[in-house]
Image (cartoon, grey):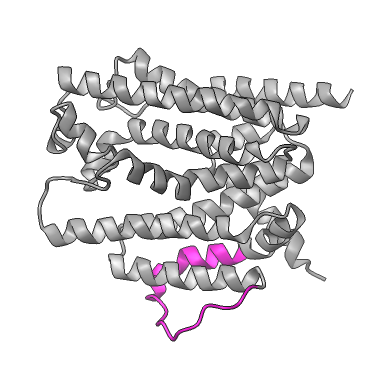
Amino acid sequence: MPDPLADSYAFCRKFARRTAKNFYYSFLGLPADRFDAMCVLYSYMRICDDIGDDEQQPVEVRRAALTTWHSEVRQALDEQSASGDDELPEPSALDVLVTGRRVLPALADMVATFQIPHEYLFEVLLGVRADLEADQHSDAQSTSIPQCCFATFDQLAAYCYRVAGVVGRCCIHIWGFNDPRALDLAVDCGLAFQLTNILRDLAEDADNGRVYLPADELQRFGYPPEQLQQRVRNEAFLKLMEFQTHRADEYYASARGLFDVLDPCGHPVLQAMMKIYGGLLSEIRRRNYDVFSHRVSLPAWKKLVIAARAIARQQLQRI
């Protein structure tokens, strides 16, 4: 007889291997049960992102799909089902939901096993919805000038908590931790990674009408948002980027405190993730902040070396 739970876990492993890129390499140093859990967590996060990022669909269709997904996740976690008679999105927008439904059995099992607070999963959906609202606002403006999504860093940090900080908290529940300080340190870690992603993707996001850097900081450095779309790399841009990378460094430094409060099995995977994302930030600096010529990334061989070292450290822990 088919085993829906086993099939769901197998699907998540394959899905993560095919799509996770940076994250997947860092998972390889974990024990088997925690590796599976990380594949499930990644799969859930990726489904959420894919619903919000499908630019082939109008914003209202993506919003409807997100509402459906929220309801199905809540039901899978045995919480009170979302009420309402919202219409289902058009069939073309349901493809990602069909994929998502294959993740749900493993998601519910993983959340129960590692006692992950359900609120973390729903915070991610609020972050995706915020992006959709920004897209709709940009469409309504009927302008080619990219729009700042956040007025201040505090607003950006609140967004980063929803799309990255809670992911960090989910991760430490899977890895294990022995001090409640880990919860705040995990948020700092997620913020460091998300800031790195934002700096790497400045040009791509601007082309899509979004600027994630705070509007007041762009103004302070004299760098208007439209110059991102124009790929202007002047003195103001270099100073802006120096400021932003220094801020990211501070969050990486704080996140290193996690090594003091994580269970040992989490150390290799955290170190791998820090090396991968920290490596991206270092590469941005090495290029003198040229994030316009081509996408910043680490070569596959370097990520494989990082993963191999993580696996070796995990094996040494078992001796």
Counting from the top left corner in percent of width and height, residue 55 is at 30, 57
Q: Which residue is at the front of the view, 289 or 169?
A: 169
224 and 284: which one is in front? Answer: 224
Q: Quadrant of residue 199?
A: top left
Q: Is 53 displayed left or right of 229 in the figure?
A: right
Does residue 280 show up? Answer: no
Picture quarter containing residue 285?
top left
Q: Nearer the viewer, residue 270 or 206?
A: 270
Q: Residue furthest left?
A: 143
Q: Which residues are magenta?
A: 79-102
Answer with the quarter of the image where residue 160 lies: top left
Q: Could you say where residue 180 lies in the image, as x and y percent from the top left?
A: 67, 41
Q: Residue at x 71, y 40 (%)?
A: 175
If the image is split into quadrants, where does the C terminus sit?
Answer: top right
Residue in the picture at 20% in, 23% down: 237
Asked if residue 120 lies in the magenta stretch, the reply is no
Residue 139 visible in the current orientation: yes
In the displayed structure image, the side of residue 95 where residue 7 appears, left or right: right
Q: Is residue 117 above or below residue 254?
A: below
Classify the position of the N terminus by image quarter.
bottom right
> Could you tell whether 296 is left or right of 161 in the image?
left
Q: Position of residue 3 (x, y in %)?
A: 78, 66
